[in-house]
Image (tube, rainbow, N blue to C red):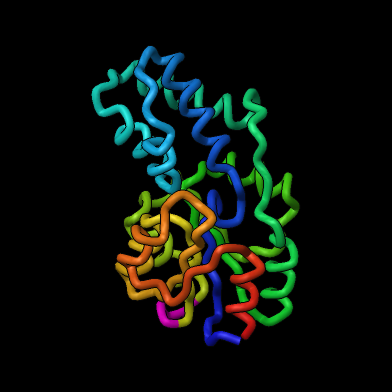
Amino acid sequence: MKPYKVIIFDWDGTLMDSDQRIVECLKVAALKADLPLLPDQAYRDIIGLSLAVALQILYPQASEWQHKVLDAVYRWQFMEANDTLMQPFEGLHDLLTSLKAAGYLLAIATGKSRLGLELVMAETQVKPYFVITKSGEETACKPNPLMLQEILQELSLAPSEALMVGDSIFDLQMAQAIAIPSVAMTHGVHGLEALSVFNPLAFCDSLAELKAWLLS
């Protein structure tokens, strides 16, 4: 077993296969705000950021009114209207059960809203596994490491006692900023080349592979 006390997970693209749902919701929001559609990869590249920051990056030319429409329509689409398939990556419950049984504390650091995070945790029935969850709307947006610092402070742990698991450059960059080691999940939004820049300890293609690495 690896010598960490807490494993901190990103959510979208790491534990949940939700990328396409997010992309489709952003596209509907853009059309409703009378803004041009962007390539799908442009939308995928901002997954992991808090919504307000992501929308500003995608549409810096938008008016204040258009940004309000983007925000409102995206939230409505994601929470209620859009039916694009979204499901946990295979092996999620087995991973969390095994890690908890091995004595790890588990936490989430995500760019999602609190409401969105609570919804998906309830749907997937994973909330009891996590001792702390941090939403991007409650603290500084990734890649600012504040949400990781808050987790460490609440658990009275040093950076060397934590491990960040994420699929985006934002996850790995915020971990690197305060010397938290990381693992890159390659089944999410950013590829191997982009993630390699941040020198993760390992690259895992699946949650089963991550489980094997952590418990070896």
199, 125: nearer the viewer:
199
Q: Position of residue 51 (x, y in %)?
A: 42, 37
Q: Position of residue 50 (x, y in %)?
A: 42, 43
Q: Is residue 207 found left or right of 183 in the rendered image?
A: right
**Residue 184 versus residue 66 in the image, above or below:** below
- Can I make out residue 86 in this image? yes
Write the residue at 39% across / 22% down: 37
37, 96: nearer the viewer:
37
**Numbered range of the magenta stretch:** 156-160
- Can I make out residue 138 in this image? no
Q: Position of residue 113 (x, y in %)?
A: 51, 42
Write the residue at 53% across / 42% down: 19
Residue 197 is covered by the magenta coloring: no
Q: Is residue 89 found left or right of 22 in the rendered image?
A: right
Which quarter of the rendered picture does the N terminus lie within?
A: bottom right
Which quarter of the rendered picture does the C terminus lie within?
A: bottom right
* Secondary structure, magenta segment, majority class: loop
Write the residue at 72% across / 74% down: 98
